Image (spheres, grey):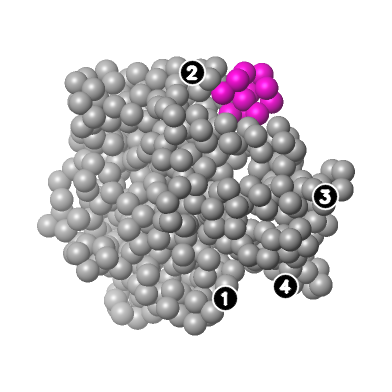
Amino acid sequence: MTPARARRAAAIVLAALAGCAGVLASGCGRPHDDPDRLTFWALGGEGEVVERLLPEFTARHPGLRVTVQRIPWSAAHEKLLTAWVGGAMPDVVQVGNTWIPELVVLGALEPLDDRLDAAARAAFFPGVLDPNVVDGRTWGVPWYVDTRLVFYRRDLLAAAGEAEAPRTWDAWRAGMQAVQARARPGQHAILLPLTEWQPLVILAFGHGATLLRDGDCRGDFRSPAFRAALTAWVRLFRDGLAPLGGAALAANLYEDFARGDVAFVVTGPWNLGELARRLPPALADAWTTMPMPAVTGAPPGPSLAGGASLAVVRGTPRAEAAWKLVAFLAEPAQQRRLWELTGDLPARREVWDDAALAGDPRVAAFRTQLEAVRATPKIPEWERIAGKIMQWADTAVRGTLDVDAATARLDAEVDAILAKRRWLLGDRCTAGTAPAAAAGGGAVPG
């Protein structure tokens, strides 16, 4: 698909779904003609600090200048799509790595295969690099990782008679039951907000679920693996180990953790700093982290390969300079500095040899987990499918439907979401050889 056709297709979709004319009219900034000025869209907290990394870049490349536009995560996805439609993209973008398949379909990114040799690829954790590879081509460079694991109150676990961090699912469940046996009314062993799909998908990966089948063209939620995971998930609530609730539960995480109202929570590295700051000094040594327990096989169990990547926008007239910026920000020294400024975990293995990372047990657990992370299905429809997982898992947890009925409804709705994909790919779906992205791609730059 050519960039022009991709923009027209995206415009039709956006206009139909979001009435984006107003968004486009508001303007995202227009391309400029200055060959020495790069524009970089940086998101969230990274956008607030990245300019502190740039003096060394401009010192290495005299004459190049970088204009950073800060964009909130909450607005970034829509802004990227509308900017592509309007021809107003920057030269370099920071993207959530689950957005990459969608941007590939639109033809919005430059492939980077010719710029990343085997040594450069090996520098990253394989599971962290993988979300950037769509249809056999590499479209982004990992900047930082956001995988999830278990944060827990080890003092409560020890008081329940469990001195060691559980390494298997059975041991973890036994630990939760021991904690729950000593809990007061209103207290629970684990916090699992029903508005988060990630912990259930992590559990499903642990059971060996693939989530989709037939070349990612149909749902596979009635598979034995996913049904086993959802059954175990539902039991956590039915047995009283987890409270029923949505986003409001997560909003009170720090207070609940401090009071001992919950002993375990599955969350990410952004809470390392938050818990250290918000919990009272008396609890400074009462909590820690551990990799995901294994359902089967050797620990750790798998987790998600979340995080953000850096990408070069397709068609930029400053592609060489844009790649220089991406390569610079992905260097070990810059990833380490970013961790110091934001707490973002490095995506490159060698940075983890640093004593400040390797010597902190709470952080080191993430190093162990990063060897066992998986990407969610690399198709543009994934975000919608994730919403359906939450919706139908909720009905099973609340008892509105049993597991068989909930997974059947989930499969039916996911199949409907993927109907256009099957129409486009035909027999390639049935054969299980369908590309991750149903369209898109482009010439590899020289």
Asked if the residue at tag 4 contacts the one at tag 1, i.e. Cβ–Cβ closer than 8 Å, the answer is no
Callout 4, which amino acid?
Asp
Q: Which label was assigned to residue 382?
A: none
Magenta segment range? 393-403
Q: Is residue 120 magenta?
A: no
Callout 3, which amino acid?
Ala
Where does label 4 land, which residue? 285
Measure the C-alpha gap from mark 2 to mark 4.
Answer: 45 Å
Q: Quadrant of residue 108?
A: top left
**Dot 2: what SS?**
helix
Residue extending furthest toward the right? 185
Callout 2, which amino acid?
Ala
**Dot 3: what SS?**
loop
Tell me which label, 1 or 4, sits earlier in the chain: 4
The crowd level at tag 4 (other Cα within 10 Å; few <14, some 14-19, many 20+) is: few
Where does label 1 land, which residue? 360
Measure the C-alpha gap from mark 2 to mark 1.
Answer: 45 Å
Callout 1, which amino acid?
Asp
Q: Nearer the viewer, residue 356 or 384?
A: 356
Measure the C-alpha gap from mark 1 to mark 3.
Answer: 30 Å
Residue 1 visible from this viewpoint: yes
Q: Nearer the viewer, mark 4 or mark 3?
A: 3
Q: Quadrant of residue 233?
A: top right
Measure the C-alpha gap from mark 1 to mark 4.
Answer: 12 Å
Where does label 3 land, which residue? 183
Measure the C-alpha gap from mark 4 to mark 3.
Answer: 21 Å
Residue 145 visible from this viewpoint: no
Q: Is residue 438 above or below residue 258?
A: above
